[in-house]
Image (spheres, coloured by chain):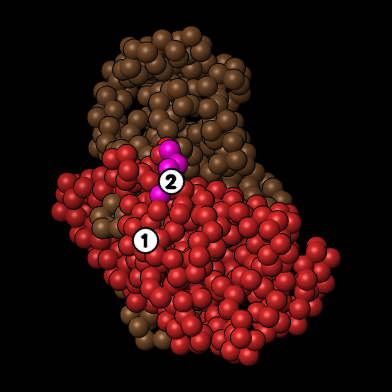
Chain colours: A red, B brown
Amino acid sequence: MTGTGRTVGVVGLGLVGGSLAQALLARDVHVVATTRDPATRADAADAGVTVVDDVDAVVGEADLVVLAVPVPALDAQLARVGAALAAHGVAPTVTDVGSVKAPVAAAAARSLPDAAVFVPGHPMAGTEHAGWGAADPRLFEGRRWALAVDAPVDLGRWADVAALAVAVGAEVVPVGAAAHDAAVALVSHLPYALAATSAAMLADDPDADLAAALAAGSFADLTRVAGGHPTLGPDMATANAAALADRLDDAASRLAALARSLAGGTPPVEEAFGAGRRGRAVLDAAHAAEATPTSARLDRAGLAALGRRGGRVVAAHPTGLGAAEVEVTVVDPGAER
Amino acid sequence: MTGTGRTVGVVGLGLVGGSLAQALLARDVHVVATTRDPATRADAADAGVTVVDDVDAVVGEADLVVLAVPVPALDAQLARVGAALAAHGVAPTVTDVGSVKAPVAAAAARSLPDAAVFVPGHPMAGTEHAGWGAADPRLFEGRRWALAVDAPVDLGRWADVAALAVAVGAEVVPVGAAAHDAAVALVSHLPYALAATSAAMLADDPDADLAAALAAGSFADLTRVAGGHPTLGPDMATANAAALADRLDDAASRLAALARSLAGGTPPVEEAFGAGRRGRAVLDAAHAAEATPTSARLDRAGLAALGRRGGRVVAAHPTGLGAAEVEVTVVDPGAER
């Protein structure tokens, strides 16, 4: 991916798209991009991006197109991409960076002439800030980048997108789209909902000023994302509504049970907190000691299984279109268990 | 409080008691303390603390006694303090650092010959670590320190404890004990419960390893306190059971409503997240721009009202026992509204 003479197209130059463009430019990759914001167009051109008029022009010039637009805009952009693919008769690989994958994969199946060109993606990288001005070419370094492996995704194209993610510093987590959506409902969208809910409880409290004055680190940590981008939380919640609703119901019944146990005695209280300690240990383990990278040839099921046990792809080698397996280097915690 | 020749007694030399002792020693205040741990006794003596055998000895030698023991131990320590006060015929001021105030005030009323000597206190300072080894003389700098003003607390003694808190760098938030307990149930104990609950959901998830691999900053922030001291969460929850149960029920019904609204359309979703943004703004405002400090003479009701509108005492002047008012310097956001 680095300096190979290929062209990467980026649609949308906000935090994620802008960071990706800057990271690629820093690695001498040619970037062609489009965005509606005039100031961002000028800034991006100054930075070395070939700024073009629209999605059609990006599709016509790029080998790999990254749709870096908010989830609510993906449907419309996929329709434009589909029209451009049909008009140009070309077949660049297309990926996205949205926070849900099954609905986006379904939209791609509806909109693209051949859904095999589309690799649903989700870099787990973001900040409270938005826009090209907040972009950072190091945004993806050390982050996880989920890439869906479900049929009909072409594994050769999957490897190309994986190589892009690795090139900008990420580790790729192969996922099934539904498993991804259930997982991020827990680790990404539920935190937003809990942040918003707790902060709303503060706003609604008759002693809000006293409570805010007494708030220390734990409440600030809990509610931090509630103060971020105004539509990001609702957009993510709406896009992943079914999976998030399941998580919210689960959380609500656990909290109600804890409330009841507080009236009835301590053992259930200790059980709830003990389970929390176990979960935190799972999280810490997933981001701590690393297994040794190993080479592997994996098919679609093998990739999904790797992701399910917490493994990541740290290098992906070029593979022909239609390949049944990809040649990858993996970090596989399951291999050492 | 600094270098006045007075003696502060500290019962328990863990994170909070140890940090307080170190902060006072750094200000040339004589500290007499007791703790059961032999290694901590030796370390504290090396640091300049006059280490004595038991609570009785602390009460006999100190002008102001700080009970820096976990909430579950406070009942027993207050009983020992009560016995010592009766035996010595002295009347040092006594305070505590527990995370709930109404139950502790009630215990003091049961255990002490004169509950007016007891000023229920709660420094909003802590870390995930415990023990003298984790103590930090700067732990209280810039932190809020709640001090209950309810009758029968003697306001002269209240001013002495406030001066102690200010001396080690804190700002004092005057509170009613019940209002304190409701507020910390929201801003301190609910975050623990949400951290434990979310982390438990991860532990219980069949795809826990995938979810943990995809977890980024928001889930790590949310669950951080779930990995801390093993008994702190359950102890706080149990000690503040009634107020926390109310918060948990409120949170549970909000989350269940959000789950229902996700099935029914977006407006309620946006409302929930919008309320979250308002709450986060309240929090940010409480810890951002400061009003100008002003002098004030406040009685019990005036102090409680100051705290309810987010105000703090930043200096407290000595006042005789039995005073109806204290002479303080305050930061009062309500004064400029």
Q: Magenta stretch: dominant SS?
A: strand
Q: Which chain is mark 1 on? A: A
Placement of the N terminus of chain B among the 4 image quadrants = top right
Picture coordinates of residue B334 (x, y %)? 62, 60
Picture coordinates of residue A2 (x, y %)? 67, 55
Amino acid carrying mark 2 in the image: Ser
Residue closest to the eye, A96 or A244? A96
In which quarter of the view is residue B27 placed? top right
Picture coordinates of residue B59 (x, y %)? 37, 20
Q: Which chain is mark 2 on? A: A
Amino acid carrying mark 1 in the image: Asp
On the image, numbered disc 2 is attached to which residue? Answer: A295
On the image, numbered disc 1 is attached to which residue? Answer: A299
Residue closest to the eye, A143 or A84? A84
Picture coordinates of residue A243 (x, y %)? 34, 72
In the picture provided, is A313 more to the left or to the right than B234? Answer: right
Which residue is painted at 52% across and 55% down in the image? A317
Q: Which residues are magenta?
A: A292-296
